[in-house]
Image (cartoon, rainbow, N blue to C red):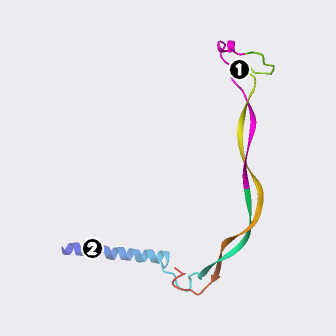
Amino acid sequence: MTLRILLASSMVLFISTQMQSLIAAEGSPYVMAEQAPPCECVEHSCKLVPETKKIMKTVYEVQEVPYCLKKLPPLCSLFHHHGCDCEMCAECQCPRYKKVLVKKEIVCKEICTSKCVVEEHRMPCQPCDSCCK
């Protein structure tokens, strides 16, 4: 039992001497009050700022988009007409057009309004325990 106590106390002594030498090599872990940076007190206030609000309107329009249609196999092409006057490639029929719905948002008018914005004011203040931690 006494051997365990002697081993534990020698380990504690060894670790404490190692920590002291480490602290001496790196410098003091505590900062002196004179070296501490000055405190800044932060205050907030509201301010009205002019703003323009855009009134948007949704508009829909139709566009025709050309696309190629692959030729049908020879057996199916017997039932379709061949009277196309356009210049076409060997794999496609005449260009076709499909209708695509396009959604756009346009600005109808702009209204001048104001909004409230929070401003932050930083000022040097006296060092205290509440703001300098």
Q: Is residue 126 above or below residue 48?
A: below
Position of the N terminus by quadrant: bottom left
Say which residue appears at 37% left-offset and 77% top-offset: 17
- Which amino acid, mark 1? Glu
Q: Residues within 10 Å of mark 2 (few under 14, many from 20)?
A: few
Residue highlighted by disc 1: 91
Q: Position of residue 19 (x, y in %)?
A: 40, 75
Q: Is residue 105 above or below residue 92?
A: below
Say which residue appears at 34% left-offset and 74% top-offset: 14
Q: Is residue 106 above or below residue 74?
A: below
Residue highlighted by disc 2: 8
The image quadrant of residue 10 is bottom left
Q: Position of residue 25 (x, y in %)?
A: 48, 75
Which stretch did the figure color magenta?
56-80
In the picture provided, is 19 more to the left or to the right than 68? left
Q: Secondary structure at mark 2?
A: helix
- Which amino acid, mark 2? Ala
In the picture provided, is 78 more to the left or to the right than 3? right
Residue 76 located within the stretch drawn in magenta: yes
